[in-house]
Image: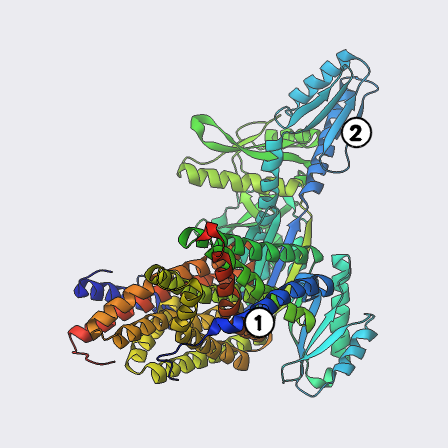
Amino acid sequence: MNLKKRNFNFLELAKTLTPISMVLSFVGLITLLILGFTYGIDFAGGNEVQIQFEKQVTAEAIRNAVQSSGMESPLVQSFGENNEFIIRVEMADDENENAKRLTLLKNSLESHFKDKGGHIRRMDSIGPQIGKELRRNGVLAILYSLLMILIYLGLRFDIKYAPSAVFCLFHDTIITLAIFSIFNLEVNAQTLAAVLAIIGYSLNDTIVTFDRIRENHLLLQNKKPFFDICNQSLNDVLSRTLLTSVTTLLAVGAMWVFADGAIRDFAFTLAIGVVVGTYSSIYVATPLLIFMNRFKMFQ
Amino acid sequence: MIESLKARLIIVTTVIVLAVIWLVPNFVLLDKDFFWPSKDRIVYGLDIQGGLHLVLEADVNELLHKRLNRISLNLQNQMKVDKISEAVITVSDAAPFFMDITVKSPENLNSVQKIIKDLGYSSDLQTLKETNTTLRLAYFDNRVKDMRVQIIDQAIEVIRNRIDEFGVSEPLLSAQGENRILIQLPGIEDSARAKELIKTTAQLEFGVVNEEFPSEKLFPLIAEAEKKGGYSLGKNKLTYREYIKKINKDLKEHLKENEKIVFEQAPSATNLQTGRIPHIVNIGSGLTGTHLEDAFVSQGEFNRPEVSFKFQPEGRKIFADLTGRIVGKQLSIILDQVLKAKPVVQGKIHSNPRITLGAGGTYEEVRSDAEMIATTLRAGSLPVFLRQLEEKTVGPTLGRDSIQKGKTAGLTGLILVMLFMLVYYRTLGIFANIALFLNMSLLLALLSSLSATLTLPGVAGIILTIGMAVDANVIIFERIKEELRRGASLKLAIKDGFYNAFSAILDANITTAIVCSVLMYFGTGLIRGFAVTLFCGIVTSLFTAVFVSRTLMDLSLLKFGLKKL
């Protein structure tokens, strides 16, 4: 990589990309509201059993075994490579009833797959109340983060920087969640953590860019228009932006390759976030800042 | 930045020494008596260790309702005694709870108010509405608040009292939010049995300690019985309930009618398994927790905390008879077969019994003992109904696999990032890599010093830190290269590079820290683990990427004659 002297006109592209991004974030928001999410059990409540067999077993056979224990519409998914499965069944209203249901399920699995060497590795039962609270807290966590960042940036930078950065984060959050919604990916507590990590990462990017714009603005205020200052700043921080994306993707990639289950999903979400976050500080945050700068009150 | 290189080197060295001190207990099993300043280590969360995780909710409202009903019953009984006819008392069925009293004449209402005062309810109940012949009463708001806390405490106390039943070495038991209890039992897989134990109603009994057969005489008998039967508490998962059954059966010949052996936790022990004192108690009086109405800590002579309690009318009679018979002897208070207190009876007690605690101990110690006894008494008087909100069981193999995979992922990530930095930055890359390595060590040391619980999301947080921590170094290095391109000398370029980069690094890290704090506040268990590791990562990476790498670079410039990057 040789990025020594460059003067790439990033913001030329912004004229087409930025409106598209803006439209996408609103469309994304509407998609979220209409389509909703496939929640994992920590948000939706329910029973989940993770079971591993020593010998080959099909998901179909497991489904039949679960149904024969009297449970309707169980969800059985293969998990990882080693004959591992996730079984999800609905929760009974009463906890004793639910405990009975799970014992029944366990016994049924044992008797059906006696010669397959199955053992239960994990069993979760989460009541609907916990899930409801978790959803509420998740939304609150995201909103409060955005609000606090807005306040901090307003104090540390200038009033015009704060809303641009926060809208950019809003954009990242919506796009990431919209991907989950459209592709029917499961949203769980880890997703929430990943979204907040993305907010952190994207913000990092935006702040480094804005810091440079602030600095160049002070130096070149009377010599160049704000648009050119921004363009130059983007070029100044370009190598840093790319390098940090690469190192973060290396770490996240290692997680995706070697870990499994929740951590793997987490890594996947983060990888989306790193790409979206890098893009958005260039094509969402900076153009918005230029737009804000047009108003007399912000200059 | 501190100008003196020497001072900076001292700081860096001190931090490294501290880090080593904190890291060592994680890798070496230190003996308890071994001289080492810190023995805290990172604890694996239940998702890695395996075990049972339960979140229960105490039904506080149900208990408030029951108590108010009980009060109304007592009032009604007393009214009958005082011959107040045609009085009606109703208690509301749902929160907020109140009690309506309707009588025939204003004189009757005065008598009712006197009864309320005489029975000692005027400190619990406030008058909401009053006419000539009706009265609406409800708990004082503060009283409700106190009772909420008490109810959770008593539920926890009951479970803590049974901790020996679970047969796990490091159970975690804590209140969560307003009316929840979190229980974590590492290593437990049979959740059904553990849950049954947790939910069994607490049994409170009052008895008399047999002082003719003191503990000293019992110890050898018990040791002999254990040896003969080849059992002991905790061995082969023998629970306390089963253990006490065996002991009582084996030593039956030494026990008179209505007598049984119970154990008291030794003062220095953390549970019954590590230290217990046997007692023979006589429970012939039949006085139990159901006879008890309330118990609380009050201020006695010289402001010493003591325990006051109240019986139901029937219980009051039995208690008076019992205490009249055993003046000078020890009354025993037994919760779930564990002796919790054995106060000496000073005389026949008709009403308002109090337990004063021994002369020793600081105010806080006496206070906490008194709280424990009061909580025990309450737990036996009105058991709390616990509803299960969440249950997670993790088998031992799953966590072992996950942490192994997490370690591989982390190490691979670390090596990849280091290689990348080295290839891209050459000499500067060495500085960045030293900083990154140190950062990871400091992060683990910091987590050890906090004896943080490492969960799988926490592991993810650490791996993410690996990728993001070099960011500060990248920002600085790019600035240095810029200065060099402008023709600055190496020394000046390094100085200006660090200076120019600082504001961006600081702002970026503070905002990420803000996000982490929000997550720590709103997140539960696992997610909080992620936020904590990420937050610690920010702190350590600020130190290593800025302070340590600057010091290393200055050192190379001044002492080792670094000329080119």
- Mark 2: secondary structure: strand
The answer to whether B261 appears left or right of B441 in the picture is: right
Q: Which mark is residue A16?
A: 1
Other-residue count near label 2 (Cα within 10 Å), few / some / many at <14 / 14–19 / ≥20: few
Amino acid of disc 1: Thr
In which quadrant of the rendered view does residue B547 lie? bottom left
In which quadrant of the rendered view does residue A80 lie? bottom right
**Mark 1 and mark 2 on one chain:** no
Q: Which residue is found at the position 41% from the left and 58% from the top?
A: B510
Nearest to the observer: residue B192 or residue A32: A32
- Residue B199 in view of the camera: yes
Chain letter of the residue carrying label 2 = B
- Residue A188 in view of the camera: no
- Mark 1: secondary structure: helix
Q: Which residue is found at the position 20% from the left and 72% from the top?
A: B491
Residue to which mark 2 is pinned: B90
Quadrant location of the N terminus of chain B in the rendered image: bottom left
Q: Position of residue B69 (x, y in %)?
A: 74, 33
Q: Position of residue A105 (x, y in %)?
A: 76, 71
Amino acid of disc 2: Thr
